[in-house]
Image (cartoon, rainbow, N blue to C red):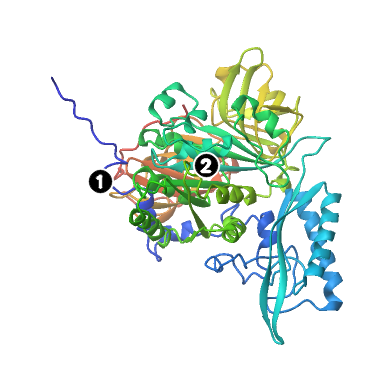
Amino acid sequence: MSHVKHSKHHLSAAGEPGWVDGLTSLKAGDAATELMTDPGESGASNATPAAIAAGARTSDDGAGGDAGGSGGEGGAAVGGGPKVGDVTREEDYDACITAALEGLAKELDGCGEVVLEAGAPSGWGPVGLGAAKLGALLARVKDVAAAKSAVVTHIRERTVGMQTPGGTVQCAVADVLVRKQTEGDGPHTPIEVRVAIIGNVDSGKSTMVGVLTRSVLDDGRGAARAKVFKHGHEEATGRTSSIGQHTLCLDAHGSVLNDSMFRAHTCGEYVARAAKVITLVDLAGHEKYFRTTAYGLTGHLPDYACLIVGANMGVVGMCKEHMGVALALKVPVFFVITKVDICPDHILKQTVTALTAILKKPGVRKKPFLVRNVDDVLLCARCMSTDALAPVFLTSSVTGKGLDLVRLFYNLLPQRTRWAEKRAAPAEFVIDETFGVPGVGTVVAGTVKAGTILPNMTLMMGPDIADGSFKPVTVKSIHYKRMPVTQVGAGQTAALALKKVKRNAVRKGMVMVDERAKPAASWEFDADIAILTHATTIQPRYQAVIHCEIIRQAARVVAMDCERLRSGDRACVRFRFMQRPEYVPLNSRFVFREGRTKGIGIVIGTQAESLPPLPPPPAGAGAGAASDTGQKGEDQD
């Protein structure tokens, strides 16, 4: 009998540098490190409801500096107030409350929810309140909330000691959640937060999704994950091979609406009653599906990434690769360590130690925070949008340990982008999936990046498969989470039925844009890139696969502002797509890969925006690329 020798996948090869290895190998002085910590990236400075309502009162009190504190004292305000150590004076009391309530009303209009730390030294509203005054303040909060069709939910109340020049003052403090209810009339627009579920194969990703969305515990033999698999071969092997979107529905009080009767085809019934929706994007963990997972992390535009780590497996294999891609894309990551019920204590300690060592490297710069109680959950939820804190949960899907803290964390997670401000802009919809539905026609699924989409609206769809142009299409009907709706706005996922459009005329990676935006495709784009790992040098004519939001295509370097690039270098480069032009969004962050080469970049110019000429490469640089083994044409499936 002949024996066939199977070659090992390059991501599994021992000693070969991966995404995390590339990031952790960066030193503080490397140019690539500067790109990883570049504060000028679009979206990095977007405020969130929780950050505004619970962030520091002054710019000097950053959340990252308070990450190691206890009990969630790093709170904040919608509009200024006294610094820590100052009690609000009686003559300023009414003015402080009025300004705080006006800010609260504005945030509810713009974001739909706010987490307040009322009465805290660095919290919301006046400071130094007794129990009676705190009760009166919360009553006024309820009045404002009622006027905005919102409800107030008490999370915890406590007393905090504050040092003042006159001595210690005991301050009554309350953490409350203010969230809009589902509106009876008008469009149904629940708050939506997208979380990508990533991690190594067999770490328990689909099991965790099944436990959360079905409100059941696993039996240790795959009962929970079987409820969320899409394909028969996934259930047979126990491994996810595709991108699955699953919904966790929450009401205005933060209670989970999902029960054991929840099914994908009945999702719309739960969403209709939900005030907030958490979309869990379940991604594949096996190395041969890495391309699919990378597409899920970029094309599905997640607000956060949840890295599932098997306590008995540690941070190994694709767990490190997925973490590296999420960190390179600047997607805030939190960590859920599963299977703690079957893991020996010393192995669990090793797993946590290895994770902590990675997060503290110069190329990562995150502060690990082990979540043990409700106080820790509140602190982490407030600080997640800053991308400086890395919460770590210890859970078991069989015993249920730690799952209540995970559910509370999902409940309090804010949207990372202020979508309400983008709904007045021209509509833009990115397509990440296409379907042919009998009796309906062509249906495209994706995310609304800007504006509002209505039935019978005409948008420009492209780049066309044949010539790269944009052609008008009309939206016939709209579904949101399997529920027919009259409109969808920026920040929501949706499925659009198109009029008189053939299925073969649509592909993943296309966009639908308002005609006023004058969309145009680009063969070339300029980018500020950094090389994480590369064996030799990179010169013009080098090819790599670009993962930029919904774009996944091979591109070639046609010009550089330096002679060559090595690991840790940073430069401005012009890429040219190999197969077709694409609609490239400005200021978007992307990753590129080719074999064992990994790099990151930010788009700074496109052909549609009239690219300025780059300085020509030094003589001899274009004679031949030192690494010309790029993949010739990886594309959308």
Q: Which mark is residue 14?
A: 1
Label 2's element?
Answer: strand
Say which amino acid is labelled 1: Ala
On the image, the x and y values in percent for residue 538 come to 34, 48
Outermost residue toward the bottom in this view:
166
Outermost residue toward the top in this view:
439
Mark 2, residues whose alpha carbon is within 10 Å: few (<14), some, or many (≥20)?
many
In this view, the residue in front, 159 or 76, is: 159
Outermost residue toward the left in this view:
1
On the image, the x and y values in percent for residue 242 come to 47, 30
The residue under label 2 is 196
Label 1's element?
Answer: loop
On the image, the x and y values in percent for residue 237 come to 38, 27
In this view, the residue in front, 190 or 227, is: 227
Q: Residue at position x 73%, y 45% from top?
A: 252
Taking 163 as reference, is 293 left or right?
Answer: left
Mark 1, residues whose alpha carbon is within 10 Å: few (<14), some, or many (≥20)?
few
Find out whether the residues at labels 1 and 2 contact each other: C-beta distance under 8 Å: no
Whether residue 391 can be seen here: yes
